[in-house]
Amino acid sequence: MIVDYHTHTSLCKHAEGELGEYVQQAIAVGLDEIGCSEHIPMPDGFDREHRMEVHDYYSLYAPRVTELRERFRTRIAVRRGIEADFYPGTEEWVSNFVRENDLDYVIGSVHFLGDWGFDNPVFVHRYDEQDVNEVYERYFDAIGKSASSGLFDIIGHFDLVKKFGYRPTRNMKEIIWEALKTVRTHDLCVEINTSGLRKPVGEIYPDETILEMARQLEIPLTLGSDAHTPADVARDFDKAVSLAERYGRGRIVTFDKRERKEVKISRLAAPHGALNH
Ligand SMILES: [Zn+2]
Ligand SMILES: [Zn+2]
């Protein structure tokens, strides 16, 4: 069994391609399940330029996933997920949105520290204007809080703060261990997200020291490409599968209506790259 649970489409205004193209690509590379995890609509115009509106969710996203799920039922399972922001003050809104909708899973992600969209290239200069150790501490503290919020199923790109290659000078192991313990306590899983390989840091999220800690805590894993274009569906999944074999006992978890199931991982039938030649 192999799945890609982290994908975005043009609905979020910063990705390309329509959902049908993602599903076609998922079938072509041999995935068993494809999950769309469009960025969640947020209240009060929060980061409006990087997400769909509430009415887009109901008129475009939700029905389109249902339609594709039916159409491709015999070839692939199409899951309706959402990537929800963890942002203090919006928990109730997110909680209501998730409860009112028929989602297969919810990825919880930290993209903001205060008003700083720290993974947005436009604001990368702000890393130079503050203590990177503190940035890391604040980030992993937020990850811990996101895990204890009770809102999510999957912790997205666990060490996203490394995206632009800014590294702490202090050892973050203890702080990361605390965040992972919270993930464990609240019985969440962590995704192996390959998009970091396509970013300045050039590394999968999370790195192997974190995956080793996750293994010790027996935290389940799942897979996501964080594709923002159909061609990136399952990108670098050969590497992701190797990591799941090593740090997840060769198992991943899948979701159906927010019910989690552990399955044995398999390799892609048509490894990525073979298609493009
Ligand atoms: Zn995005
Ligand atoms: Zn994200």
Image (spheres, rainbow, N blue to C red):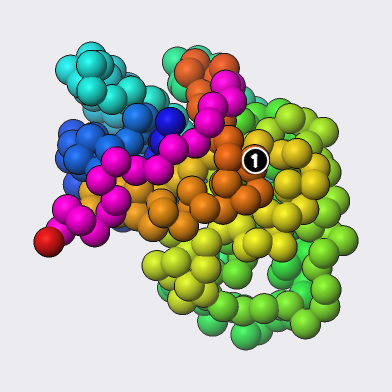
Span of residues in magenta: 260-276
- Image side of residue 104 versus residue 219, left or right: left
Of residue 75 and residue 123, the one placed in the foreground of this image is 75
Say which residue appears at 41% left-offset and 54% top-offset: 238
| Figure label count | 1
Could you say which quadrant of the image residue 108 lies in? Answer: top right
Say which residue appears at 33% left-offset and 23% top-offset: 77
Secondary structure at numbered mark 1: loop
Residue labelled 1 has its Cβ within 8 Å of some atom of ligand 2: no
Q: Position of residue 178 (x, y in %)?
A: 85, 51
205 is higher (above) or lower (below) than 46:
below
249 is higher (above) or lower (below) than 67:
below
- Image side of residue 71 versus residue 44, left or right: left
- Image side of residue 119 versus residue 129, left or right: left
Q: Name which residue type carries label 1.
A: Arg
Is residue 13 in sight in this rendering? Answer: no
Q: Position of residue 254 (x, y in %)?
A: 51, 27
Say which residue appears at 29% left-offset and 51% top-offset: 271
* Outermost residue toward the bottom in this view: 128
- Image side of residue 18 versus residue 158, left or right: left
Question: Does the magenta segment cover residue 265?
Answer: yes
Q: Position of residue 276 (x, y in %)?
A: 15, 58
Q: Position of residue 43 (x, y in %)?
A: 50, 37
Q: Read off the residue under disc 1.
A: 249
Question: Does the magenta segment cover residue 229?
Answer: no
Check the picture and name the quadrant holding the N terminus: top left
